[in-house]
Amino acid sequence: MKKATLLLLALICSFYQTKAQTKANSKTKSSKTNQMKLVWSDEFNYKGLPDSTKWGYDVGTGDWGWGNNEAQYYTKADINNVLVGNGVLSVIARKEKRADKEYTSARMVTRGKADWSFGRVEIKAKLPKGRGTWPAGWMLGSNIKTAGWPLCGEIDIMEHVGYDPDTIVASIHTMAYNHTKGTQKTKRIFIKNPYTEFHVYACEWNAERMVFFLDGKPYLTIPNEHKTDKEWPFDKPQYLLLNLAVGGNWGGTKGIDESIFPVKLEVDYVRVYQ
């Protein structure tokens, strides 16, 4: 009986030590995040067009290599497609013909204005609803013009396609791991109320790994295998993109519901920590 009691006490002590260590590790991870400093942000606390010192645009239907057969024409600094008000950025897709496309929208970029090697990127956003929509918050290597895609690297912090409701997808694309080969590293998860509530989509990366978060909870971790740039080009600077595509190879897989337009991607803030 005495031995049994001692064994029980040992097991209880071991349980609480493990629990305490787990809590300590959690605090350590949290403190590391808290030690990061805000190095860039747009809180959208103004009115009109997005801040031109922070954002540029990809314009048209094909510059910079978006080869996904999308149905929109991306405009430049057009308040019909990008507008800041009430503390929120709206990226708006409309059913209107431009050039050879049936829709207009916007693709905002920090290329040439800001980029980062390692850190944490947070995007607080509310997503558009409807079949044919394809909003995204993502990053590309700043050397894309010389290295090309996918050698430059791509980090998809958040993607959503309207025909697959209440889900988001995070991915990386590299020379070794990309969707054209079916080797991309990716994860699709359920999200509650993405069309009526703002959620925080984030990616944090360093020389060892990349972690994706939804509302502060990690759901995908990709380690650096320490091979070559073909597997991990993410030591080099990456710039940020926000866009709302229409249709395309993925977003338009099940067609486009023309009755939903105009639709908008709303962004409360974008923050970068290092």
Image: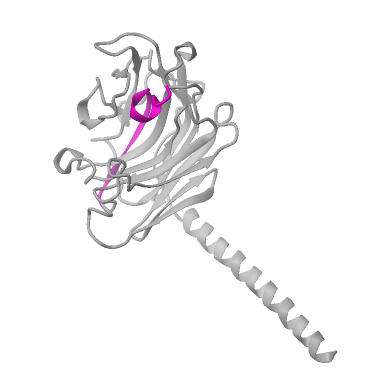
Relative to residue 242, is residue 34 drawn left or right?
A: right
Residue furthest out toward the bottom: 2
Question: Is 8 inside the magenta-drawn segment?
Answer: no
Across and down, in percent, residue 178 comes to 30, 45
Q: Residue at x 38, y 44 (%)?
A: 171
Q: Residue at x 40, y 32 (%)?
A: 136
- As displayed, is residue 54 above or below residue 172? above
Q: Is residue 122 visible?
A: no
- As displayed, is residue 240 above or below residue 245? below
Q: Is residue 213 visible?
A: yes
Across and down, in percent, residue 61 comes to 25, 21
Across and down, in percent, residue 235 comes to 27, 54
Give the tally of numbered discs: 0
Report the coloring of the rendering. one colour
Across and down, in percent, residue 87 comes to 50, 25
Relative to residue 216, is residue 244 drawn left or right?
A: left
- As displayed, is residue 19 above or below residue 156? below
For this rendering, which residue is in front, 38 or 241? 241
Quadrant the N terminus occupies: bottom right
Q: Which residues are magenta?
A: 236-254
Question: Is 246 inside the magenta-drawn segment?
Answer: yes
Residue furthest out toward the top: 97
For this rendering, which residue is in front, 26 or 253? 253
Q: Residue at x 22, y 40 (%)?
A: 149
Residue furthest out toward the right: 1
